[in-house]
Image (cartoon, rainbow, N blue to C red):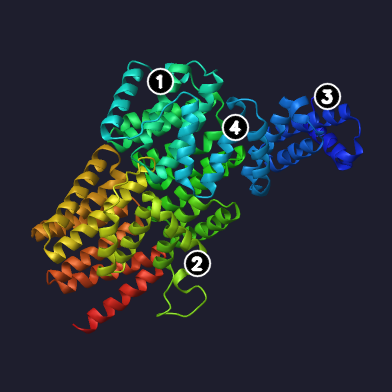
Amino acid sequence: NDDDGLFLIAVGQINLGGPNAVTDAKEATAVANHNLLAGKKARAMSDYFSAYWFYDYGISYLKKGHWNTYYDLSLALYDGAATCAIIIGEHASLSILTEQIVHFAKCIEDKLNIFDVSVRILIKRSNLSAAVDSSIEVLSNLGEDFPEEVTPDVVIHFIEETKEMLDGMTDEELINHKLMSDSNKLMTMKFLLTLSECLYMIRPSDQPVAVLKMVQLSLMHGMSPLSPLAFVSYGSFLASMGNISEGYRFARIAKALLETVGSRGVAGAVICYSTQIMAYAEPVQSAIEFHIEGGKAAMKSGVMGYAMMNRLCYDSGSFWSGKNLGAVKSQLDRNISLAKQNKHVLILVQLMPLYGSVSKMSVLPKSIISNSEADGDRGDDQMEKLGRDLRVENPFQSKAHYFNKMYIGFMFRNYSDMKSAAEKYSKFKVGAWIFIFSSSVQLFYEGLVSFWIGRNEEDNEWIARGKNACRAIESLAETASAWNFEHKAMLLQAEEQYCDGNLEHAGTLFDSAVLSAKQHHFLNEEALSLELAGRFYLKTRRKKRSITYFSQAIEKYHEWEASAKAVILEKYLEELVSAS
């Protein structure tokens, strides 16, 4: 009958007897075929542990010389086992499975899936350069060359080509476009996606070419299950370049394509990327909730990497949108443990700098209290070493690392640490055009830091950096979302006027930033605006007014549960009042 559950139970019962119980070669082959079908059914249900178990048992029933006598069956079982093994972390058996397929597969087409698995192993081991080289080599074998050097002119050429191909196509035409049927093109899309994800981490300026090639292949040869990810990435690229409406349009098209091309495997990533565009243009506090949906979609399809990516973005969005720090820290604790459990190294090393910032803001340091939680120290020496190693070849990771150091130096008024981190941070010209909301947060704090350094050292170059950041955030407040960016623009404008000596105007803008942050529920930046206003009034010899602002800032930091920050500001205020 058509009862899948009953079939899986039946095959499981046969397997309990083991291959030794089946001596007849034909019967053994029949049982191997049953296990192949059971593995496919289990994968369709996203039960990858059971699927691997069935594939592995199916292999055990194959008799000597099976690659010659039952080639298709052997290839399907080994391919299925390898695919499931990498998902469930069964890394010990992967090398054996890989060696068998590479040795016995008859043609390049039959080796493509295991090449994909091999590249994913390299990614899991954080060997991203090797993963990029392997992907480009496979693409070359598939007839899809990748430029040896990606210059800005090369990217512009691909953008213009893509725009020309899309010109005149309506949303409906794109959503109902023909389907891709060429197996080589389908595999090309797969390796372009892998290449794109690796390039994002180590050669981000090259990534747009991989994405644009995927869009072009989809338009020329039809939509594949990976096309929605290509179109939402293209939308992110457009949004990061300032074309918010077109970026939003392609995010909507990508989500619609999930239904028409059956893209369950990339649903988590499509939701993740489109949510980042939403967080750019809609109230971020509500937009990031879609990352929860993205995480569930990824878990359902068994793609743990995309599930963890959604969790990372949700944690980051929660912190920067001013959600309760106690809850954010609890989320991070769970997700760091989950990333370790599933050996998602790249996600883990991105979570750790964020965890450091959250802990330093919320956990009281040892100099104030003494307990096992002090300093938020997880004792992850091995992870710290891994982070340092990854920063050698990974500009994206390096930028995030130095940004968090710069942020903590700024928030705790440690000028030398902040400036040192800012100088290192500014060397990494890495555009985060996939995670565009996070990129805007970095730009905002870079502007605040630049104004402080420029004002402190009377350095016009730093002040110019601050003004550039201010203009960019002003543009986002106008074209993306006043909700997310109005108060940020006002705070930067206040700092700019402070640097230019327009003190009355600066005071008005500080007050406006406080009010706007409050109206738009950014508790973290309401507290920050109050504190910076207090420092402004203190420096401009209005001490009584500064004390009022500092007191309100402390109240808001406590409300945010930024306990460490609040206590240190309280001590500063006590000293200030006692000196009156």
Q: Quadrant of the C terminus?
A: bottom left
Q: Please name the residue shown 91% across and 30% down the image.
A: 24
Question: Of the residues shown, which amino acid type is indicated by label 4?
Answer: Asn
Disc 3 versus disc 2: distance between alpha carbons? Answer: 55 Å
Distance from Cα at disc 4 to Cα at disc 1: 33 Å
Considering the numbered disc 4 on the image, is that residue within a helix, a strand or a loop? helix
Is the Cβ of the residue at disc 3 closer than 8 Å to that at disc 1? Answer: no
Location of mark 1 (residue): 171
Q: Earlier in the sequence, mark 1 or mark 2?
A: 1
Structural distance between the alpha carbons of marks 2 and 4: 36 Å
The residue beneath circle 4 is 113
Q: Quadrant of residue 510?
A: bottom left
Measured in 3D between alpha carbons, the distance from the residue under mark 4 to the one under mark 3, in whole angstroms, is 32 Å
Marks 2 and 4, the one that precedes in the sequence: 4
Query: Is label 1 in contact with label 2 (beta carbons under 8 Å)?
Result: no
Q: Earlier in the sequence, mark 3 or mark 2?
A: 3
Residue at (75, 26) in percent of width and height:
68
Residue in the image at 65% along x and 34% along y: 103
What number is the disc on residue 381? 2
The picture quadrant where one finds residue 415 is bottom left
Q: In this image, 135 relative to 61: left or right?
A: left
Q: Which mark is residue 1?
A: 3
Number of the front mark, 1 or 2? 2
Vertical relation: 510 (above or below) 97: below
With respect to residue 391, does 284 lie above or below? above
- Identify the secondary structure beneath mark 2: helix
Mark 4 closeness class: few <14, some 14–19, many ≥20 residues within 10 Å: many
Nearer to us: label 3 or label 2: 2
Q: Earlier in the sequence, mark 3 or mark 1?
A: 3
